[in-house]
């Protein structure tokens, strides 16, 4: 990649002002939503790496149905701003890739077409998708607003040479464990991989944490939010904690719980010890990829959607390990996924549905699998994707083991996500900087729970 950040980075819904992004590809029509009113449809996505495979799906779909599909690809920020503007002006695309952070607001605004009747009429078998993914797109009634298209988990990308030089093997990395008391074998690895400017490692006498040349673990500025997908979530979830009472449609939150506090306390310790960069450094970089490729980070927790960015480059030999086993006795990862939504204002709902059902079918998801960019949501297509990754020489079992071992947790879906995310982002950052404490986390949690009363 670098792919625009598209997964569990739970972001606030963007304001309506927008700069018109550049259309990278398409067929027929011009401008957002312009295919509406004709026999064709417009389809938006934000991931440029997936766009060629979806163009293959569109070409096959058009050849089979005679319905032209115009694909438009935008950068992450412009994408959501453009949708907001399109909804307001009546120029939104007929179909668009949807994200769980935005879905609740779009559904509550009436911007999404309810697909439940069409799904039932066409007899679509929801059991073909990885367990739980179809339920993510259910409204607070019986509505269904999407069908799963792909999924992701989080793993530990690591510099193979640095790890080997530190005396660790891939087998050891596959069985790491952590705890909030001494960090376990996971913290031992991170300390050994950390090096100061004098060449002293973090587990050696004389290590200078004020002059770190290589951090054992990166801190993703993009992951410092209420989902914590690439930062604190794998540890909190494996410490017998979950975000709230349920999902979808979480209504009571648990950011003030002791398990969450002790997890963040240990996570902050990694910064204080010099093993992980500060929040200010992470925020200045946002994405740790460039720092990793420059040799400033030995490991990075990141999502499977980043495979091609880490495993597909040649400058730094890289492998991926699963997240460590926690106090619960299991490892953990958030389990996120995307769907394709139909804009409620489309002038071609029947054609849009045919396209969406094609996107959610084996015919298209097998094409996505062969591109070896993401994991398709259909179970049989996931297997084909694993083979396609392996054919590239990429071992991605660090991601798929979470699904196989059922150690995933669904991303919380709730109303008020924008306000919730703003509140918890500030609280988590404050805690990691040392200006917040357990009481501040509890206070933030109380203010969030108040939104749902």
Image (cartoon, rainbow, N blue to C red):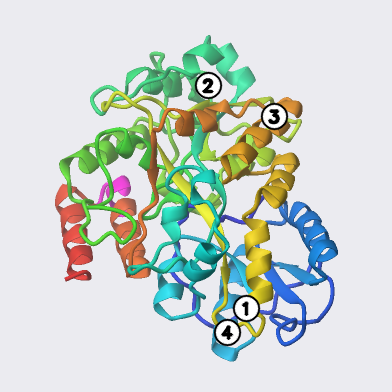
Q: Which of label 3 and label 2 is nearer to you?
A: 3
The numbered mark at residue 345 is: 4
* CA neighbours of label 4 inside 10 A, class few (<14), some (14 to 19), many (20+): some
Q: For numbered disc 3, what is the local secondary structure?
A: helix
Q: For numbered disc 1, what is the local secondary structure?
A: helix
Q: Is residue 307 above or below residue 361?
A: above
Asked whether 191 falls inside the magenta stretch, the response is: no
Placement of the C terminus among the 4 image quadrants:
bottom left
Q: For numbered disc 4, what is the local secondary structure?
A: loop
Q: For numbered disc 2, what is the local secondary structure?
A: loop
Q: Which of label 1 and label 2 is nearer to you?
A: 1
Label 3 to label 1, Cα distance in Å?
36 Å
* CA neighbours of label 1 inside 10 A, class few (<14), some (14 to 19), many (20+): some
Please give the residue where the numbered disc 2 appears in the rendered image. Answer: 198
The numbered mark at residue 349 is: 1
Please give the residue where the numbered disc 3 appears in the rendered image. Answer: 387
Q: Nearer the viewer, residue 433 or 227?
A: 227
Q: Position of residue 26 (x, y in %)?
A: 81, 69
Residue ID at (41%, 69%): 143
């Amino acid at each position: 990649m670098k792919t625009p950040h598209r997964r569990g980075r739970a972001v606030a819904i963007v304001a309506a002002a927008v700069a018109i992004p550049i259309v990278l590809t398409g067929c027929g029509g011009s401008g957002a939503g312009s295919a509406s009113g004709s026999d064709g449809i417009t389809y938006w996505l934000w991931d440029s790496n997936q766009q060629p495979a979806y163009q293959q799906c569109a070409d096959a779909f058009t050849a089979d149905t005679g319905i032209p599909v115009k694909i438009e690809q935008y950068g992450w920020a412009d994408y959501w701003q453009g949708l907001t503007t399109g909804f307001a002006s009546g120029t939104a695309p007929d179909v668009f890739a949807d994200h769980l952070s935005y879905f609740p607001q779009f559904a509550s605004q009436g911007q999404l077409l309810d697909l439940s009747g069409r799904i039932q009429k066409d007899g679509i078998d929801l059991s073909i998708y990885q367990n739980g993914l179809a339920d993510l797109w259910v409204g607070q009634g019986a509505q269904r607003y999407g069908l799963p298209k792909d999924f992701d988990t989080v793993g530990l990308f690591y510099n193979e040479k640095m790890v080997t030089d530190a005396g660790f093997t891939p087998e050891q990395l596959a069985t790491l464990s952590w705890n909030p008391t001494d960090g376990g074998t996971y913290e031992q690895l991170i300390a050994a991989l950390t090096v100061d400017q004098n060449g002293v490692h973090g587990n050696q006498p004389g290590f200078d944490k004020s002059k770190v040349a290589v951090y054992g673990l990166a801190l993703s500025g993009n992951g410092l939010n209420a989902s914590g997908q690439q930062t604190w979530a794998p540890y909190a979830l494996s410490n017998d904690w979950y975000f709230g009472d349920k999902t979808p449609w979480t209504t009571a939150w648990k950011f003030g719980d002791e398990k969450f506090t002790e997890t963040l306390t240990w996570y902050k310790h990694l910064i204080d010890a010099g093993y992980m960069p500060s929040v200010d450094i992470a925020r200045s970089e946002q994405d740790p990829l460039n720092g990793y490729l420059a040799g400033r980070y030995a490991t990075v927790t990141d999502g499977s959607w980043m495979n091609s960015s880490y495993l597909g480059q040649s400058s730094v030999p890289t492998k991926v390990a699963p997240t460590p086993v926690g106090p619960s006795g299991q490892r953990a990862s958030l389990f996120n996924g995307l769907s394709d939504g139909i804009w409620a204002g489309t002038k071609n709902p029947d054609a849009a549905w045919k396209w969406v059902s094609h996107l959610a079918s084996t015919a298209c998801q097998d094409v996505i699998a062969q591109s070896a960019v993401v994991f398709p949501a259909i179970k049989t297509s996931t297997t084909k994707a694993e083979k396609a990754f392996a054919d590239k020489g990429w071992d991605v079992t660090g991601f798929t083991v979470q699904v196989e071992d059922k150690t995933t947790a669904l991303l919380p879906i709730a109303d008020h996500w924008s306000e919730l995310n703003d509140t918890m982002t500030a609280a988590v950052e404050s805690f990691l900087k040392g200006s917040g404490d357990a009481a501040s986390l509890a206070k933030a949690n109380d203010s969030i729970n108040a939104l749902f009363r």
